[in-house]
């Protein structure tokens, strides 16, 4: 009988110990989580250098516009480092990005670092920064504007198909792949492209402090390596992120020890697009298929 009582007492003691250690473990885990949340919140609330990644084809993006507007107003952001790896995109997309960066630059310094590629609208975005850095092997430049069309009337004739259009005026919907390009529509289209081209080279002239007469020979659509770009005044220095932080410290007094925090730009996509992107990537839904109208894009593989 005494043995049974002792056994019961021992079991109760063991249970109490187990409960104590379980409670202690839970409290410890909660404490770690609270500390981690506090550190994360402290990191988010600290002064920092914002990191803006610009990659892929550049198009007009209201979500990005809103994020950059918030960035300009955020007093915790002491400077912005823009990493660019883009072949370009639409003229409007590049113009929007350029203007948003200039608005930020009114309040805090911006340095752009071009990695592998920063051409056309990608270069337009880069000149929105106060200082441009690229690698020796970077491909940049391709200053120009393009509007593409296709004439498939010959193919339609071979198939026995004829296309007709009732227009309010001859230049409505021109250029049109379903009809030959007339001299009048060609002239009107060229005038639009030339006007946007003038806008681009004026931006380069102003931001790079170069006369238009010096910019035009560089703005014939050709690309440059980083080594060539610095010789021609299209960029300021060779290097990468370290050189960008050095410039911010030396020229703008931005502490090199400030953390680098990525700018979060959330983009919502449809379920169908999500499915195809996760299974076959961008084989069927290429970013370039979203381009319409005038573009500033370097795409030699399509030539």
Image (cartoon, rainbow, N blue to C red):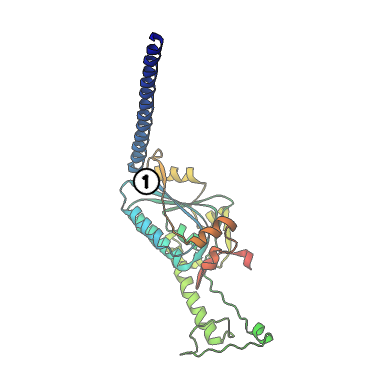
Position of residue 221 relative to residue 137, above or below, is below
Give the farthest residue toward the front: 1
The quadrant the N terminus occupies is: top left
Q: Mark 1, residues whose alpha carbon is within 10 Å: few (<14), some, or many (≥20)?
A: some
- Residue 128 is at least partly visible in this image: yes
> Which image quadrant is residue 156 in?
bottom right
Indicate the secondary structure of the residue bearing disc 1: helix
Question: 222 or 156, which is in the foreground?
Answer: 156
At x 38% / y 31%, what residue is drawn? 29
Question: 7 or 40, which is in the foreground?
Answer: 7
Give the farthest residue toward the right: 158
- Residue 57 is at least partly visible in this image: no
Give the percent coordinates (x, y) of residue 154. 66, 84
**Residue position marked by numbered label 1 in the rendering:** 252
Give the percent coordinates (x, y) of residue 11. 39, 18
Position of residue 108 relative to residue 95, above or below, is above
At x 39% / y 22%, what residue is drawn? 18
Question: 109 or 84, which is in the foreground?
Answer: 84
Give the percent coordinates (x, y) of residue 107. 32, 53
Left or right relative to 102: residue 301: right
Give the percent coordinates (x, y) of residue 302. 62, 67
């Amino acid at each position: 009988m005494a043995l049974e009582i002792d056994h019961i007492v021992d079991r109760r003691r063991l249970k109490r110990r187990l409960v104590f250690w379980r409670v202690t473990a839970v409290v410890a885990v909660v404490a770690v989580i609270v500390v981690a949340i506090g550190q994360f919140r402290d990191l988010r609330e600290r002064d920092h250098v914002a990191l803006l990644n610009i990659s892929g084809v550049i198009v007009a993006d209201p979500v990005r516009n809103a994020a950059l507007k918030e960035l300009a107003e955020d007093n915790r952001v002491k400077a912005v480092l823009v990493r660019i790896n883009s072949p370009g995109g639409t003229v409007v997309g590049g113009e929007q990005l350029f203007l948003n960066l200039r608005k930020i630059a009114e309040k805090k310094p911006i340095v752009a670092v071009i990695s592998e590629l920063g051409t056309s609208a990608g270069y337009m975005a880069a000149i929105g920064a106060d200082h441009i850095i690229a690698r020796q092997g970077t491909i940049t430049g391709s200053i120009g504007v393009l509007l593409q069309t296709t004439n498939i009337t010959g193919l339609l004739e071979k198939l026995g198909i004829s296309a007709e259009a009732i227009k309010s005026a001859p230049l409505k919907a021109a250029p049109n792949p379903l009809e030959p390009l007339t001299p009048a529509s060609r002239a009107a289209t060229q005038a639009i492209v030339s006007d946007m081209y003038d806008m681009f080279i004026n931006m380069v002239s102003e931001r790079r402090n170069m006369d238009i007469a010096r910019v035009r020979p560089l703005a014939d659509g050709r690309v440059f390596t980083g080594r060539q770009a610095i010789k021609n005044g299209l960029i300021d220095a060779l290097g990468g992120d370290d050189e960008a932080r050095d410039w911010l410290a030396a020229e703008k007094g931005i502490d090199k020890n400030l953390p680098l925090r990525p700018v979060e730009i959330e983009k919502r996509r449809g379920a169908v697009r999500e499915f195809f992107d996760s299974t076959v990537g961008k084989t069927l839904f290429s970013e370039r298929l979203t381009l319409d109208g005038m573009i500033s894009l370097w795409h030699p593989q399509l030539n």
